[in-house]
Amino acid sequence: MASQDWFDKDFYKVLGVDKSVSAADLKKTYRKLARQYHPDSNPGDAKAEAKFKEISEAYSVLNDPEQREEYDQIRAMGSGARFSAPGAGAGGGFDDVFSRFGQGRGQPQGGFDDFFTMFDQQGGGFGSGRFGQTTGGFRGFGGPQKGADVSARTTIDFVTAAKGETITLAGEDNVPFKVKIPAGVSDGQKIRLRGRGRKSPDGGESGDIVVTVAVRPHPVFTRDGLNLRITVPVTFTEAALGATIEVPTLGGDPVRLRVAPGTPSGRVLRVKGRGISTTKGTGDLLAEVQVAVPAHLDDAAREALERFHELEPKENPRADLMSKAR
């Protein structure tokens, strides 16, 4: 934005607010206008786009307390102090205006150069692109706006989530795009593809594609952080006498585990390094032993168990439970 615009443009009028408007009311008014005139809401409407830039420019100045004060001071000088030639009248020349402005800010009365120096020190940067130049990217002054983000969803199987894979999804207008699923992605995690969303309406940065990942449950394994959990049934005799059993791993060969004699239900056996592997580390496989009770016994098996019942220690496994419950 050129310096002359600070004289020419009534930012309060652009937003339809009074000069005494509070910051909260200013923001509320701007948001309402921005929604009304945003290019996404008015595709192909050049007038709406121009209006959107105009209100963005006005809001960016009035929303900044320091810039609002500077703007009010310049406007208070009146349009008679515009870019008139030297000697056009006392107090009416270009140098007079900026000398007065410099005095109000405690700046040396150096005229034109001092005015621009002061703005440069404040970060205004005339010539730096901040004031409306298309290369500056100062969004508040009608500069390039970032394009809108696009949301997408995908559902993958448990193994794909654990191992990672590049998949293809259908985007807007059925245009396909590829998504790299990182190893160890969890259910509900979001993957952001920067710059792959909608284009900016005025040459700015494109938006992103945000993909939400849903993971189908596995019939055997569950996630526990980077660890994998599995429930492993064993027979009564395997638990009582001890045994070596095979346990499946996710997408790999089974491993052999030793079940110690007298292993109770609920005991967890750990297999190092066979969990989820990510850049942050690798988890373990946690196998929880569950003693499987036979649903049907033939006469011989029942007779053998009855003999065992007569011989087993006469300890009450619930005695400690009863004492603690009192």
Image (cartoon, rainbow, N blue to C red):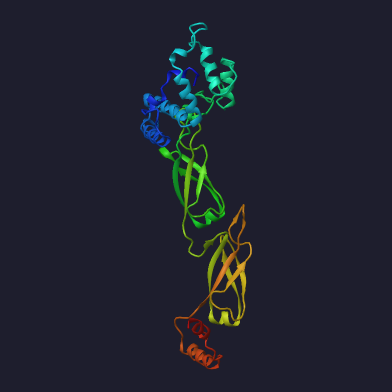
Residue drawn at the location 58% of the way across and 82% of the way down: 240
Q: How many marks?
A: 0
Judging depth in this view, the residue of 40 and 259 nearest the camera is 40
Q: Is residue 42 above or below residue 319?
A: above
Left or right, 205 with reference to 28? right
**Residue with the most extreme top position:** 87
The residue shown at (56%, 50%) is: 182
Q: Do we see residue 103 in this rendering?
A: yes
Q: What percent of the width, then of the height, locates residue 190?
A: 49, 48
Is residue 143 visible in this depiction of the protein? no
Task: Please say if 17 is above or below 158.
Answer: above
x%, y% of residue 152? 44, 45
Q: Position of residue 246 (x, y in %)?
A: 59, 71
- Viewer-nearest residue: 188 or 232: 188
Q: Is residue 1 above or below residue 175?
A: above
- Tell me: residue 133, above or below residue 274: above
Q: As drawn, is 251 to the left or to the right of 76?
A: right
Q: Residue at x 43, y 15 (%)?
A: 79
Image x and y of residue 198, in percent = 45, 35
Q: Quadrant of residue 54?
A: top left
| Residue drawn at x 55%, y 25% as measured from the top left | 124
